[in-house]
Image (cartoon, rainbow, N blue to C red):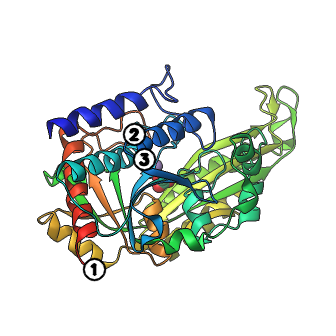
Amino acid sequence: MTGTRARFEAMWADLHPVGRSPVTAGYRRFAWSEADLTCREWFVGEAVRRGLDVTVDRNGNQWAWWGDPDGGGAVATGSHLDSVPDGGAFDGPLGVVSALAAVDLLRDRDVRPVRPLALVNFTDEEGARFGVPCAGSRLMTGDLDPDRARSLRDADGTTMAEAMSAAGHDPAHLGRGEEDLGRLGAFVELHVEQGRALVDRFAAVGVARGIRAHGRWRLDLYGQANHAGTTRLADRDDPMLRLAAAVLAARESADRHAALATIGKVNVEPGGTNAIPSLVRAWLDARGDDEAAVRAVVAAVGAAGAAEPVEESWSPEVTFGRPLRDRIAGLLGGAPVLSTGAGHDAGVLSGAGLPAAMLFVRNPTGVSHSPAEHADIDDCLAGVEALATVLADLLTGQS
Ligand code: GLV
Ligand code: MN
Ligand code: MN
């Protein structure tokens, strides 16, 4: 384990400064940005150093292969390296670093795989730049239309196609990766826990039961720009008031339907202190156990804001398949089994019919999508150990 600790810490130290804001200590590793490209280069370097063959699929996801990719029934593990705005260090990178560390551990233990192992860095998991989460895995499964993906725009008006091209990836071939999917027999994603369930259960590692239904909607609230000092209150058409009503409705209706609703991103045009806005654009994230409850919340928010919510993404509820989940829980000696409200590429792949599972590593702060996100090194190493145990079984046992 000493070797694992040193190797894990060295990889963590290499990634530490990439895309880190000196002001907030949060990460801004948006898909296809400079910081993301540095992370992608780092992934290639770590793979090559281990003698793994790197491929990039048509959708820009990076794969590092131990064994012949076409050997049949590959076991894949990994996560993502992009981040939300001012994200923590662990959401995504913990799964990728742990995957690399687990390969080293399997080799230390002279494990001889009878099927290929793929380490993956899924592109654009957070959807922070172009709005659609898990874009890389959704494109791969066919859940995201390639024409729509190419035309998604970031805040500066750059399309995903332009951003990919500038980064050296040809966007012409985006789309369902029949061959890429056909290579895989199972996917196991390790992730920092985004809550405190493992803290409460005194466990370093848990196994995912499922992912709650969730989606993102845009509200376009139009008004009339006018002078802040001369327009009588009675004469105003101020969309900011409708945003305020929508925000309050999000909270109230989420509470009523036992769901979650968040308005965390707002653009205001023209954005002058002394002008009534002409347009307030807001994004609603809504999640819950039950699709009907989530949709009821979205309808209530739209009604309060007097705008029709535009659906930008939808992720149905996922229950990870029992055979793989039970096999992993058994291997890990009764690790707690948890559901989560956070979206993951493992959920997308599971939804597409691939046996998929997740391991969670304890997060003592319980905070995520924030610089306060954390996992202690001993728990990270417990995660690597658990992942290596699972991979050894999947790579050498009956498929
Ligand atoms: C991704 O982390 C999400 O759940 O939004
Ligand atoms: Mn995340
Ligand atoms: Mn993540």
Q: Is residue 108 left or right of residue 76?
A: left
Q: Residue at x 44, y 61 (%)?
A: 255
Q: Position of residue 304 (x, y in %)?
A: 66, 59
Q: Earlier in the sequence, mark 2 or mark 1?
A: 2
Q: What amino acid does circle 1 point to? A: Pro
User: Is label 3 in a helix, a strand or a loop?
Assistant: loop
Image quarter (top left, top right, bottom left or bottom right) of the C terminus: bottom left
- C-alpha span from label 2 to label 3: 21 Å
Asked whether 175 or 315 is in front, the reply is: 175
Q: Is mark 3 within 8 Å of ligand 3?
A: yes
Q: Residue at x 73, y 55 (%)?
A: 171
- Which-is-in-front pick, marks 2 and 1? 2
- C-alpha span from label 2 to label 1: 34 Å
Q: What residue does disc 1 label?
A: 323
Q: Position of residue 351 (x, y in %)?
A: 48, 74
Asked whether 185 or 197 is in front, the reply is: 185
Q: What amino acid does circle 2 point to? A: Arg
